[in-house]
């Protein structure tokens, strides 16, 4: 399984998710829940504890790498995110088809998902830098072939944020899952390939102010 890490930027620090963060996550999720119309976010301590425990169980299987997002401006945990659906293409193909093979040291593809932020951290650059840190880990350390990002097709704000990264719209899968509002959800699928990462990284450097003056 990939070694777990802490990812640090100028605005945020992505810390390994743990049960110690539950109370801080409950406070973050309780700020203004009207912003979660299309995102399923745990409500209350019991739901949050179950949410963290489930993420840690998947982490133990090598299938996800969950983070708590600490906003350095306030030194508060303001949300969570994760690299997930980690697939390992090394070694022999699992048999029968569809069986879950043994995990390796480095994932071959990954998704970024389960991202949510406290209302006070939305629109501040916290989400953008969090995505940049995870993309950098995936493409530069793991050297994955693809990172996938998904959003409810109705979630204009999330889709705009994904498109601003430079991700490619692969298509919309109709009736893909149950939505956060208990409707049947159509999901927009986006991806970034390893060959596209240099241009995406350059664009993110400009948006994050990481480009050095000539």
Image: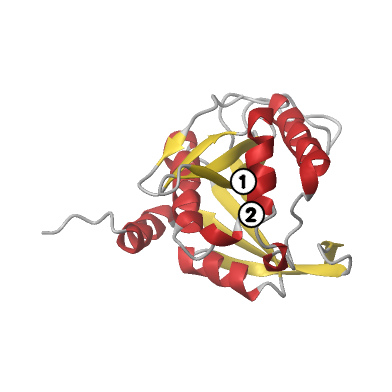
Residue 26 in sight from this viewpoint = yes
Asked if residue 114 can be seen in this view, the reply is: no
Label 1 element class: strand
Of residues 30 and 196, the one drawn nearer to the viewer in this rendering:
30
> Considering depth in this image, is 72 or 208 the residue closer to the camera?
72
Q: Tell me where residue 180 appears, x and y as whole percent.
A: 81, 62
Numbered tag placed on residue 116 in the rendering = 2
Say if mark 2 contacts mark 1, CB within 8 Å.
Answer: yes
- The answer to whether 171 appears left or right of 12 in the picture is right
Check the image and report above or below for 138 versus 166: above
Q: How is the image coloured?
A: secondary structure
Q: Residue 80 bears which disc, if any? A: 1
Q: Quadrant of the C terminus?
A: bottom left
Camera-side residue: 55 or 138? 55
Vertical position of residue 4 compared to residue 136: above or below: above
* Image location of residue 55, percent across then percent down: 73, 36
Residue 79: x and y in percent read 60, 48
Give me the residue at 52% from left, 63% from top.
167
Q: Residues within 10 Å of mark 2 (few under 14, many from 20)?
A: many
Q: Is residue 60 left or right of residue 126?
A: right
Q: Position of residue 53 (x, y in %)?
A: 77, 32
Which residue appears at 57% of the width and 27% of the height? 2
Q: Height in image: 126 above or below 173? A: above
């Amino acid at each position: 399984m990939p070694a777990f890490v802490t990812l640090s930027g100028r605005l945020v620090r992505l810390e390994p998710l743990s049960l110690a963060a539950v109370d801080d996550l409950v406070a973050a999720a309780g700020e203004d829940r009207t912003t979660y119309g299309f995102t399923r976010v745990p409500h209350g301590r019991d739901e949050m504890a179950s949410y963290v425990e489930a993420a840690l169980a998947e982490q133990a299987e090598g299938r996800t790498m969950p983070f708590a997002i600490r906003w350095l401006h306030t030194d508060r945990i303001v949300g969570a995110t994760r690299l997930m659906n980690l697939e390992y293409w090394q070694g022999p193909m699992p048999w029968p088809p569809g069986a879950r093979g043994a995990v390796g040291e480095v994932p071959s593809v990954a998704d970024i998902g389960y991202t949510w932020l406290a209302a006070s951290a939305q629109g501040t650059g916290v989400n953008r830098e969090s995505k940049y840190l995870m993309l950098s880990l995936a493409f530069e350390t793991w050297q994955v072939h693809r990172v996938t990002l998904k959003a409810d097709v109705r979630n204009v704000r999330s889709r705009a944020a994904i498109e601003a990264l430079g991700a490619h719209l692969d298509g919309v899968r109709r009736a893909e899952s149950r939505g956060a509002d208990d409707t049947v959800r159509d999901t927009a699928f986006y991806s970034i390939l390893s060959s596209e990462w240099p241009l995406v990284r350059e664009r993110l450097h400009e948006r994050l102010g990481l480009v050095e003056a000539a």
